[in-house]
Amino acid sequence: MSKDAQILIVEDNPRNMKLARDVLDHHGYRTLEAADAEQGLVLARTEHPALILMDVQLPGMDGVAALDRLRGDPETAGIPVVALTAFAMRSDRERFLAAGFDGYLEKPIDVRSFPRQIAALLDGAGDGARR
Ligand code: MN
């Protein structure tokens, strides 16, 4: 997948949003931003991003519920969705993967490893495989 892939960030914390956006911008990705799940679902449907980074803790609908909506909509079911989470517990990670996320990234994101993680996630997305 090319480096100008469009990535949707769903994140309610402005500082976390800015950090993710700035790193992705710097590495040549195009970004879309949503501050809540409802706005994210609309952008996913209309823009068909290559990847969605989904904060789990959001005001209103949380990230897990938003993932269910994405999977249940033929327009968005195939888009890989990665959980952004401040939780580091092993049980939490397993819970997120069991919920159907294609991966997870811990916050705060590490600006050095983040681009590699994104590239790997986009590579994996190309074959349509769920991980
Ligand atoms: Mn949040």
Image (spheres, rainbow, N blue to C red):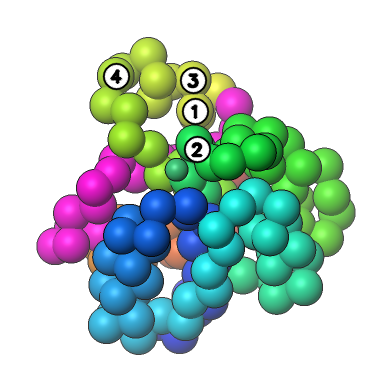
Residue at numbered disc 1: 96
* Amino acid residing under circle 4: Met
Residue at numbered disc 3: 95
4 or 2: tag closer to the N-terminus = 2
| Residue in view at x 50 percent, y 29 percent | 97
* Amino acid residing under circle 1: Phe
1 or 2: tag closer to the N-terminus = 2
Tag of residue 89: 4
Magenta: predominant secondary structure element?
Answer: loop
4 or 3: tag closer to the N-terminus = 4
Measured as percent of width and height from the top left, residue 72 is found at 82, 42
Q: Label 4's element?
A: loop
Q: Nearer the viewer, mark 2 or mark 3?
A: 2
> Is 11 inside the magenta-drawn segment?
no
Q: Is residue 23 left or right of residue 59?
A: left
Q: Is residue 115 above or below residue 113?
A: below
Circle 2: is it few (<14), some (14-19), or many (20+) Cα within 10 Å? many
Q: Is residue 32 left or right of residue 26?
A: right
Tag of residue 56: 2
Q: Is residue 63 left or right of residue 47?
A: left
